[in-house]
Amino acid sequence: PNRSAIGAIYVHREDSGRFADPDGENQTYGIDGRWGIGDYGLISGFAAGTSTPGLDGDDYSWSLSGTYDSPAWSSMLEYVEVGENFNPEVGFLNREGGYRSPRARVLRRIRPVNSRIGLLEIRPHVSYTGYWNHDDFQLSGFLHIDNHLEWRNGYEFHTGINFTTEGLLEPFEIYEDVIVPPGTYRNSEVQLVLQTDEGAWLSFHVTGVAGGFYSGDRVSLRPGMRMRLGEKFVAELNWIQNDVDLPEGDFVTRLGRLRLSYSFTPKMALEALLQYNSVDDFFSTNLRFSWLRKANTGLYVVFNDTHGFDRYTGAEPNRSVIVKYTHMFDLF
């Protein structure tokens, strides 16, 4: 199939009403494209700009990437640059203030023949993602070296090591009364993953990470389970616990998450997400009912509720209901 394409976007936002800001407007514009080369190669990229009153110059963003994905090899090389004043107000920007980011990945797929221990595939791989600001200060870096072992019964075991870099230009309060001073922190950590067959009606997984973290150490444990009953009901339960030991202070964070989904029909579903955060002692509930038509149009009803576990947490309850309906029709 033809995997080449080109596109363009223009978005205009402007304040309106009695209290509108005379300078309250913003424009975002850009082009993107991709070029498929043979069966496995792909080159893609984009160039974009914004216009915001009071922000002059350095309001650009661009990216260029190349990927190769065959049955035996998968590789990617990408470069992204965002100007300091790039400001897509109707959109999403993962890091403000501008950055330069090189990214790379190489993965090999090896399928042993007549493995005595039932191995289906071995996937050694290396990936790197880095961020620098426009003053050549490294904000973060993540080098991941891993090997995935997959058995014919669906079980997997991952053995990885990560080399991390975190750069702080100013003090960072990572936890209440625990402040990490500015500087560049380089660490390494071991990462192990074990998971059972995700295609079964009941599956389990656990991820363990141990190693350096900013000026100290961290041990992270993330167990979880997934249950599927037929084609209609799915339940997922996950727990994330981080035990952090820093010279500036020790702390433990816990995050529990329960996700439920029931499909009445292929286009009608009820979903629930219940989450507990120990840092804020918060419990949140998200319920969503969706009745889809074509091209993801249709009816969405969302209920959100957030509150503390007791009246002494100091947190105010937050409750909202959102209803959205989208209908697509042909003009000609």
Image (spheres, helix red, strand yellow):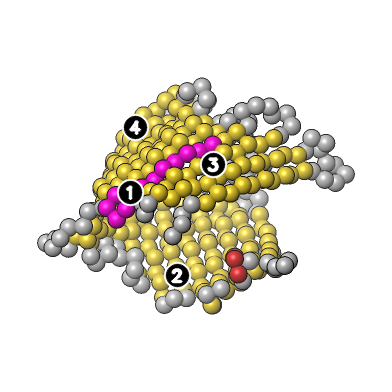
* Disc number placed over residue 74 in the picture, else none: 1
Which of discs 1 and 2 lies nearer the camera? The answer is 1
**From where the camera sits, is residue 221 visible?**
no
- Would residue 56 be found to the left or right of residue 278 on screen? right
Residue with the most extreme top position: 135
Circles 3 and 4: CB atoms closer than 8 Å: no
Identify which residue, 279 or 309, lies in the foreground: 279
Which of discs 4 and 1 lies nearer the camera? The answer is 1
**Residue 200 position within the rendered picture, expressed as x and y whole percent measured from the top left:** 33, 70
Q: Which residue is mark 3?
A: 46
The stretch of residues the image draws in magenta is 62-74
**Residue 56 position within the rendered picture, expressed as x and y whole percent measured from the top left:** 68, 27
Q: Residue at x 72, y 67 (%)?
A: 332
Q: Is residue 195 above or below residue 23?
A: below
| Residue 279 forms part of the magenta stretch | no
Residue type of the residue flagged with mark 4: Asn
Circles 1 and 2: CB atoms closer than 8 Å: no
C-alpha gap between disc 1 and disc 2: 31 Å
Q: Which residue is mark 2?
A: 234
Which of discs 3 and 4 lies nearer the camera? The answer is 3
Residue type of the residue flagged with mark 2: Val
Residue type of the residue flagged with mark 1: Ser
**Residue 87 position within the rendered picture, expressed as x and y whole percent measured from the top left:** 64, 37
Q: Which residue is mark 4?
A: 187
Q: How many marks?
A: 4
C-alpha gap between disc 4 and disc 2: 38 Å
Q: Residue at x 22, y 53 (%)?
A: 110
